[in-house]
């Protein structure tokens, strides 16, 4: 019975050391750009371990480049190094490297040149990392007029812009359009619905979804806040130029 507590403590320590860095990486990725899939706890554990292996691999490479020896690793493992060393290693494993891996992955996912070129060179379809057409379009954050046919036969439309939201997880996949539009008899876009504050749709009621590029006269008008911000910026630029002209005149 007396050995149960130390064994439990060792197991918890191993869990923190080998799983937590990878789990932090998963959380950072899912917070910034990766849509969490419906994986089992065991699958998430394996994913965490895989990222932990990468993190410790980077630490080993950095230690090798820095001239670390086997004696240094042994002292670190046996708790014979100073507190500052453990703080630095812990910060690298739990904060710095998970953040670096997450940001590099986010940059790679959004790369408009390098990633497509690499995928073409390796003959890998870019659809390999895209779960569905829903994510393919709405993940690009492209402004569009959207026409939706519902399962009850109705056809509705609206504007998808910066204030809209397309939820990605499949169990909660729904769409919020920031502005509803009126349609004519042929189901084409006429004008924004008066006083519209948006349109919410659940994917389970959507039969088909069509997206169109808005024409210049159909583009969403600039909001009052955006207009005020633009005027304020213009005023700052004008004041800055006037001050520059005054300084030039004084020098002359």
Image (spheres, helix red, strand yellow):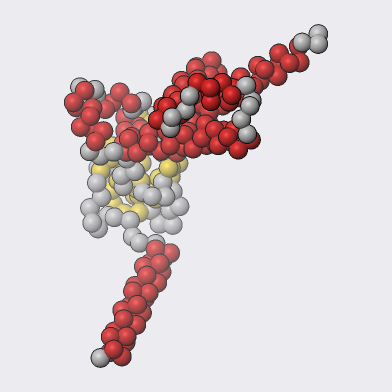
> Which residue is pictured at 37% across the width and 33% down the height?
105
Q: Position of residue 153 (x, y in %)?
A: 36, 32
Q: Is residue 120 above or below residue 167?
A: above
Residue pictured at 64% horizontal, 25% vertical: 79
Q: Return the residue nearer the eye: 180 or 187.
A: 180
Camera-side residue of 49 and 134: 49
Whether residue 111 is situated above or below residue 52 in the rendered picture: below
- Nearest the viewer among 107 and 93 is 93
Q: Residue at x 41, y 69 (%)?
A: 228
The x and y percentages for residue 39 are 49, 20
Q: Position of residue 37 (x, y in %)?
A: 46, 24
Question: Which quadrant of the rendered structure holds the C terminus?
Answer: bottom left
State whether residue 149 appears in this view: no
Indicate left or right for 11 with 213 as reference. right
Q: Is residue 21 left or right of residue 159?
A: right
| Residue, far right | 1
Q: Residue at x 20, y 22 (%)?
A: 123
Q: Quadrant of the N terminus?
A: top right
Say above or below: 46 vs 206.
above
Report how many numbered discs are placed on residues in the image: 0
Note whether residue 8 is visible.
yes
Q: Is residue 93 left or right of residue 66?
A: right
Residue 85 image point, x, y percent? 58, 34
């Amino acid at each position: 019975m007396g050995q149960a507590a130390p064994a439990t403590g060792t197991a918890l320590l191993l869990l923190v050391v080998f799983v937590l860095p990878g789990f932090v990486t998963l959380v950072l990725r899912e917070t910034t750009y990766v849509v969490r899939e419906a994986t089992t706890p065991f699958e998430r554990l394996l994913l965490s371990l895989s990222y932990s292996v990468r993190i410790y691999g980077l630490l080993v490479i950095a230690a090798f480049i820095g001239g670390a020896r086997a004696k240094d690793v042994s002292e670190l493992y046996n708790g014979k190094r100073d507190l500052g060393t453990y703080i630095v290693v812990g910060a690298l494993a739990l904060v710095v490297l998970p953040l670096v891996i997450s940001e590099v992955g986010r940059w790679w996912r959004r790369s408009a040149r390098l990633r497509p070129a690499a995928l073409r060179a390796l003959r890998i379809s870019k659809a390999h990392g895209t779960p569905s057409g829903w994510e393919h379009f709405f993940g690009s954050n492209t402004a569009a007029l959207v026409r939706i046919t519902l399962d009850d036969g109705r056809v509705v439309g609206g504007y998808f812009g910066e204030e809209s939201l397309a939820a990605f997880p499949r169990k909660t996949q729904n769409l919020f359009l920031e502005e509803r539009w009126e349609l004519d008899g042929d189901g084409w876009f006429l004008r924004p619905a008066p006083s519209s504050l948006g349109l919410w749709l659940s994917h389970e009621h959507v039969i088909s979804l069509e997206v169109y590029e808005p024409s210049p006269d159909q583009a969403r008008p600039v909001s009052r806040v955006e207009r005020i911000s633009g005027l304020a910026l213009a005023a700052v630029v004008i004041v800055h130029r006037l001050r520059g002209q005054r300084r030039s005149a004084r020098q002359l």
